[in-house]
Structures are given as C-alpha cells and as structure tokens.
Amino acid sequence: MNDHYDNQKLLRVAIIHTSLHKPEELKNKLKAYNIDVVAITELSNRSLCEIDANSTDVILVDLHENVGQELDVLENLLEESALPLLFNDSGTTQFNLSISGADWGKKLALKLRALVEKSSGNIRSSAEQSTVSVKNDIPKIIPATTIPKPIVSSQKQTIAKPHKGAEQVWVLGASLGGPLAARVFLSCLPTDLPIAFVLVQHIGASHITLLSEQLDRATQLKVMTAKEGHTLCDNEVVVAPIEKRIVINDRGEIVLAPILHHSIYSPSIDEVMTDIAEKYHALSGAIVFSGMGNDGEEGSKVIGEHGGVVWAQDSESCVISSMPDCARRTGYVSYSDTPEGLANNLVKYLAQN
C-alpha cells in the first residue's frame, strides 16, 4: 500500500447498497486507501438500525439508477441519519471516471475523507452538513458559445400560444435531494414573476400531496397538485402526478393524459419537458436539480432545440449530481448554480426578457 495512505487515520465506513451491486468488491477497493468497511447492509427502511453509529464515521450509499420507488427510502435516510452520508451513483460515476482515466477507488476514498472532515469541522450549514455527492469537476457556467443554436427560432412568429393562463412555463426536474433543493429555490422567489412552474419530482405517489403542502408553506407562490381542467397561471407551481402524464392544452388548461412510455422514472421528467417544449417553444424553460440517473437529459435537448432555456443545479450543492451532470453534457445548459443562486438569477433573467 502507498505510504501516504498507510499514514492516514483509519476511516470507518458503513455501506448501504442495492441488490444489484457487489459490495465486497467495493470493500476491497476501499481497503487499499486505509478505509475499513465496518458494516454492509442492503437498502431498506431498517438500514440505519443495522449500523452502529459509535463505530462508524461515514455512510456510503452505493446506488444504481434502477432504485425506482426506493427514492422515498433514500429521502428518509437524508432526514434521519446522524452520520454524514455520501451518495454514489455507481453507473454514472464509473462512466465519467473511465473517460478521465482517474482511479475510481481513490476518487471515492478522497470524497469520503473530505466529507468526514467537513462534517467534523462544521464547514457546511445544518441543511447541507450531512450530505455530499460524488461529482465531476464541471464549471459553474458553461460559455454560451458551446450551446447549439435553436433549430426552430424562425418559427417563433407563427407558433400559437395558449390564449389564457401563463405564457411562460418552466419545468423543475428533481429526484434524490430534490425536495430540499426545490424548497430552497422556491422560497427565494417573489410573487410577481410572469412565469408558471411544473415540478416533476421522482417520489412515491403517496408523497405527492405532502410534498405540495410542504412547498406551499415554504414559498410565496401557490403550490398545488395537478388537477384536470385547471388553468396554469403565473406565480403557480403545479406538482406533476405519478399515475398520469401532465399536458397543457391550447387553452392553457391541465390535461391528465395516459402515460405513453413506462420507464424506471416516475414521473418522467423527459416526457414533461418534451410536452412543455412543444407547446411553449421559446417560452419554455427547465431547471434540473439534484438527482441520480439521466432523466431530464433528453428533455433538456428538446427544450434547447425549441429555443427554450435550460439551467441546472451545480454539482457541489447536490445530494447526488448525476441528473444535472447529464443535462450539462447535452451542451444546452447555459447556467449552473445553487438553488438560491438559480432563483436569484431567474428574477434577473425575467426582468431583462
């Protein structure tokens, strides 16, 4: 073993994993960097009960994008764990590291140590202290020259807009870590913005109403679950349902349509982004918040190709940054920041456009 790691303090790590992974391989990989895996448990509502907090420094939650409705369990981990948590989207992380040629085990070990040091030193705020993501080194703002030219800009004058309700609609896409990010973002917005939002949050169907109520208490905007026939208006946030697909018709009214393509993501951010882009074109927009997997990647392309705006949460402030990182790879993300920074920039953007 490298002398550098021999001299480092032994770090005690507990691994929470999905059944799709081989945690023993991960354990052996981390051992080379003076990290002792003291517990291995499969993801469940009892995962924390099986970990001795007195003999553990940090929890590594090793995930695959096919976690489905287990995202509710992961959100509970965020709320209940007294130990710092590091979420690792194995598939996306290994893909990106294979491109850079970096050693996956070394990168992960450095992240674990940095998280423990930050938690011990109280560097992060109470809302952020217990979480961090394995991320890539991506700049906050991607130069505008890298953004492909919209392919339908010449059609702007001929596109029919909904004749009532909000004229500008942005999709807020979120997954793991998204409820906190969305709450911070919406709490920073004033009530006089000429825009409506559709929040597409990966979450269990039983949590949709609760999420709407929590967000409604946190923001000056009106937050509601999607209702058939409701006219989408400025200063509103409509939370997309799970069992139906939300569509806005030519009158600006919500239609709850059948889901066209079932996928591991529920609801589908890509599907909602595509519908909004095809309806609002250059008056559409999207912000991709914290989450794992790549939902929102294809939708970001569609919104960008229709002349809309795409932003994303920066990697550093995400619980797990796979989703916004995938959106950035499309080349259509023109601005990245913290949830608070995104809100402040949106106010400036709308004032200038």
Image: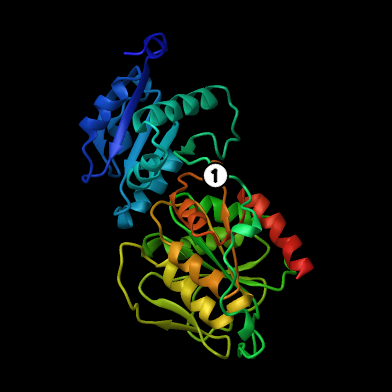
Q: Nearer the viewer, residue 52 or 159?
A: 159
Residue 138, given in percent of the width and then of the height, sits at 54, 44
Q: Note whether residue 326 is visible.
A: yes
Hey, which quadrant is residue 259 in on the image?
bottom left
Query: Which amino acid lies under the numbered mark 1 shown in the image of this protein?
Result: Ile
Instruction: Please name whichever residue, 248 or 217, is drawn nearer the observer in this view of the structure.
Output: 248
Where does residue 253 sit, x and y in percent of width and height? 54, 86
Quadrant that contains the C terminus: bottom right
99 left or right, relative to 165? left
Q: Quadrant of residue 231?
A: bottom right
Q: Which residue is mark 1?
A: 138
What element does badge 1 sit on?
loop
Q: Is residue 173 above or below residue 258?
A: above
Assign the N terminus to one quadrant of the image.
top left
Vertical placement of residue 126 versus 227, above or below: above
Q: Residues within 10 Å of mark 1 (few under 14, many from 20)?
A: some
Corner quadrant of residue 108: top left
Between residue 101 and residue 68, name the one nearer to us: 101
The residue located at (24%, 25%) in the rendering is 28
Q: Is residue 239 left or right of residue 343?
A: left
Residue 198: percent from left, percent from top: 54, 70
Image coloring type: rainbow
